[in-house]
Image: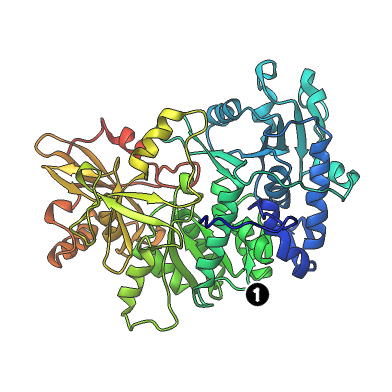
Amino acid sequence: MSNIYHSAPSAYDYPLLIKQLLNRAKIVSQDQEIVYADKKRFTYKDLFARINRLANVLANLDLQTGDVVAVMDWDSHRYLESYFAVPMSQYILQTVNIRLSPEKVLYTINHAKPKVLMLNSEFAPLVKDYQFENSSIEHIIWLDDNGVSAEGMFGDNQARVVGEYESLVDAASADFDFPDFDENTIATTFYTSGTTGDPKGVFFSHRQLVLHSMAEAATLGMLPDKQGVSYGDVYMPMTPMFHVHAWGFPFTATMIGLKQVYPGRYAPDTLLDLIINEKVSITHCVPTILQMVLGEAQDRKESFNGLKMIIGGSRLTEGLAKAALAQDIEVYTGYGMSETAPLISLTEFSLNEPEMSAEQDITRRCMTGKPVMMVEAQVWGEGNKPAGTGEKHTGELVLRAPWLTQSYLKNDDAGKELWENGYMHTQDIAYIREDGYIKITDRLKDVIKSGGEWISSLEIETILSMHPAVADVSVIGVRDKQWGERPLALVVLKPSHQDTSAEDITAVAEQAVNKGIIPKYGIPSEFKFVDDLPKTSVGKHDKKVMREMYANQTEV
């Protein structure tokens, strides 16, 4: 007997499409606010109409199903509208990483081949001399906050400029009927940071983004109010909307119906003003941005009133976590990658917490977190076999979840390598504790191999960050005649501690050795004090650049 059900003839076969994320908010959040910096303020009712208007603008451009619409903008209401209108119209949204080098920005555009470019006037100089003869771009929609006209900007290619965004949207109809279609249709694409070779394109379907939004809401909804998300929260991204969908939060926040604030370009004073004036209560960012807003608040003697902040992208060090908590930021860690859409794990909090010391609490907040719902996480050792749990069973973290990119765009070979043996390979070295917490100890490419032993650069960075004089620190491996590689510590000192010596900071590492936290050979052989550390386009420490900088200068 078959166990496959037969639905009623008129039953709705509910496809998991991005348009379904709007269903609840359309009923209950009509009067909720969307804020764009100090420039624009409107309601969800307006948002739904503007999404329809943008869809009508695109419908008049003679596009085909599956065509790519690229966006080059800061975090804005326009970006939020494109998150919905573009994929809901069966086009693919390309979020262009405008912090890549100009050459790599143009590489991603040439590779994705968008038909439409939504271009902020601030990035026009980059596109102005673009070789349009060989370009896929047929239409440019002009985005502007500064009264800059597109007139005469593109010379012989001026005809490609359709018009200015707000004028086009205002003139379009507010009625649009978004169709149903296959939920496995590609919705978005964007490119990795490209720290090793050319950027690689990842892509996500409607089904994947809906499931990711549901899992994100459910995971945060399981946390206590002090750390989780609730209907009264005010959301603002401090991770760019061009990077991994701002960690999926704009989709999730819109689905829930939260007040949303979009800050434009990230400037510490603007971010802090918006947090205070709009009563922002939940956000996310990389450690670099956290350091920026902490410094701004210290200068202004402001507190953050319990702001919930998820840190990802780079390791949250214990020193930075302490500084954030001291300024009333409820800081904790999430983990993911461009390839994972990105949410994989999150720090866990409970209403019935076992008693723990302040030090244990800090350690927990800085761990990689526990896998979120529907994520299968394993650590593989030799021979691609599960290594088991516990600190002694370290290996590569591999994943399965329903929202992981299925390959790389137009790069099947890299996709096969990513998914070797049916699991996504993260290239992160980790172990999983008995209680389910994941502890990432390093990237495969960043592990320091000294005398046959592996040294975790992240672990050493965490120890050194505890010194009160250290503002930022990165540890890399440099050549050593005797040991092959030895750790070099690059340290940024706080302005008030410029007289600190290498011996002072070494003492912190020696204490960790005495407590059995790190081995003696983990103490860096040399310290260099620097004004700042190279960062990638999304604010992570760029260790590839650091290794190149110090490859020939240092042999410890």
* Residue 82 at x, y percent in the picture: 71, 46
Position of 106 with respect to 193 (left or right) is right
* Residue 237 at x, y percent in the picture: 59, 57
Which residue shows up at 22% across the image and 44% down it? 448
Position of 554 with respect to 261 (left or right) is left
Position of 259 with respect to 178 (left or right) is left
Which residue shows up at 67% across the image and 21% down it? 135
* Residue 63 at x, y percent in the picture: 76, 31
Mark 1 belongs to which amino acid?
A: Gly
Can residue 347 be spotted in the picture? yes
* Residue 529 at x, y percent in the picture: 31, 48
Of residues 298 and 40, the one drawn nearer to the viewer in this rendering: 40
Q: Please state, as top left, top right, bottom left or bottom right, where the C terminus lies in the image.
A: top left
Task: State whether residue 15 is above or below residue 384.
Answer: below
Of residues 290 and 468, the one drawn nearer to the viewer in this rendering: 290
Which residue shows up at 63% across the image and 49% down it? 265
Of residues 229 and 467, the one drawn nearer to the viewer in this rendering: 229
Can residue 197 be spotted in the picture? no
The residue carrying mark 1 is 232
